[in-house]
Image (tube, helix red, strand yellow):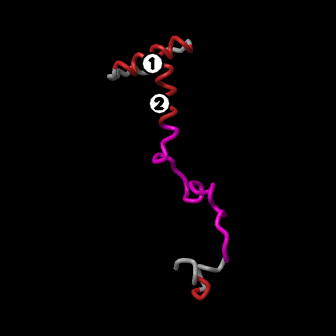
Amino acid sequence: MQTMTFKIPGPIREKLNTYSRKKGLSKSEIMRKALLNFFSSDKEGKKGSFFDLSSDIAGSISGKPYLSTRKPCQNGYGI
């Protein structure tokens, strides 16, 4: 593991010190967990197919299945 040095404002440093004592964790462990949490919540860094990224909403819209191919049926759907 490599060592990294960075600047931190006083109020955040105090919160880190207090949290470290309260939880019995090293400041390094808290920072590692915070960084992992930050990177895991980063939406921009996610990879996958369009379906993988939109699978939570796939199939959530109801309508006629042939709307994209039959122009007369598209009236009233904003097309």
The residue that appears at 62% across and 58% down in the rendered structure is 57
Q: Quadrant of the N terminus?
A: top left
Q: What secondary structure is marked by label 1?
A: helix
43 is higher (above) or lower (below) than 7: below
Residue at numbered disc 2: 35
Provide the residue span drawn in magenta: 39-64
Amino acid carrying mark 2 in the image: Leu
Q: Quadrant of residue 67?
A: bottom right
Disc 2/disc 1 C-alpha distance (Å): 14 Å
The residue that appears at 52% across and 26% down in the rendered structure is 33
* Upstream in sequence: badge 2 or badge 1: 1
Q: Is residue 61 left or right of residue 29?
A: right
* Residue 22 x %, y %: 54, 13
Q: Is residue 16 left or right of residue 74?
A: left
- Which disc number belongs to residue 16? 1
Q: In which quarter of the image is residue 72?
A: bottom right
Q: In which quarter of the image is residue 11?
A: top left
Helix, strand or loop: magenta stretch: loop
Q: How many C-alpha atoms fall within 10 Å of the one at disc 1: few (<14), some, or many (≥20)?
A: some
Q: Which residue occupies the foreground of this view, 22 or 68?
A: 22
* Residue 60 x %, y %: 65, 63
Amino acid carrying mark 1 in the image: Leu
